Amino acid sequence: MNTSVKEILELSVSDRLQIVGDSWNSIAADSAKLPISDDLRLELDRRLEAYEKDPKAGVIWEDLETRLIKSR
């Protein structure tokens, strides 16, 4: 791809959002190739263990989002 940033910025917002979405999807598809630090791995393991001990202690994103929006 030989498109410059300047050319991308000249596109419509809709087209730029499409590029962002496509880029993000390609990154997500390759995310297994991304290294994570030992500290991050430990934190993820800690959170998974906490969830497995008490799955009801957390909240689902939709509920948290609703609470956050209402608190504004």
Image (spheres, rainbow, N blue to C red):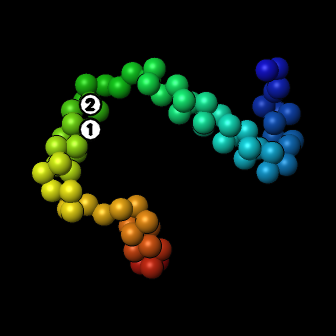
Q: At which x and y percent is residue 31?
A: 48, 28
The answer to whether residue 68 of the structure is visible from this angle is no
Give the residue displayed 20% in from the left and 62% down from the top.
Answer: 57
Q: Residues within 10 Å of mark 2 (few under 14, many from 20)?
A: few
Q: Secondary structure at mark 1?
A: helix
According to the picture, the residue beneath numbered tag 1 turns out to be: 44
Residue 70 location, quadrant = bottom left
Q: Nearer the viewer, residue 12 or 9?
A: 12
Q: Horizontal placement of 43 versus 10: left or right? A: left
Find out whether the residues at labels 2 and 1 contact each other: C-beta distance under 8 Å: yes
Give the residue displayed 12% in from the left and 51% down from the top.
Answer: 53
The answer to whether residue 56 of the structure is visible from this angle is yes
Q: CA distance from mark 2 to mark 1?
A: 5 Å
Q: Nearer the viewer, residue 4 or 58?
A: 58
Query: Which residue, as the protein is rendered here, is positioned at the far left?
Result: 53
According to the picture, the residue beneath numbered tag 2 turns out to be: 41
Q: At which x and y percent is residue 34?
A: 44, 23
User: Tag 2: residue type?
Assistant: Arg
Q: Secondary structure at mark 2?
A: helix
User: Tag 1: residue type?
Assistant: Leu
Q: At which x and y percent is residue 43?
A: 23, 38
Q: Nearer the viewer, residue 68 or 61?
A: 61
The vertical placement of 33 against 71, above or below, is above
Q: Quadrant of the N terminus?
A: top right
Residue 63 location, quadrant = bottom left
Q: Nearer the viewer, residue 60 or 4?
A: 60
Q: At which x and y percent is residue 61?
A: 40, 61
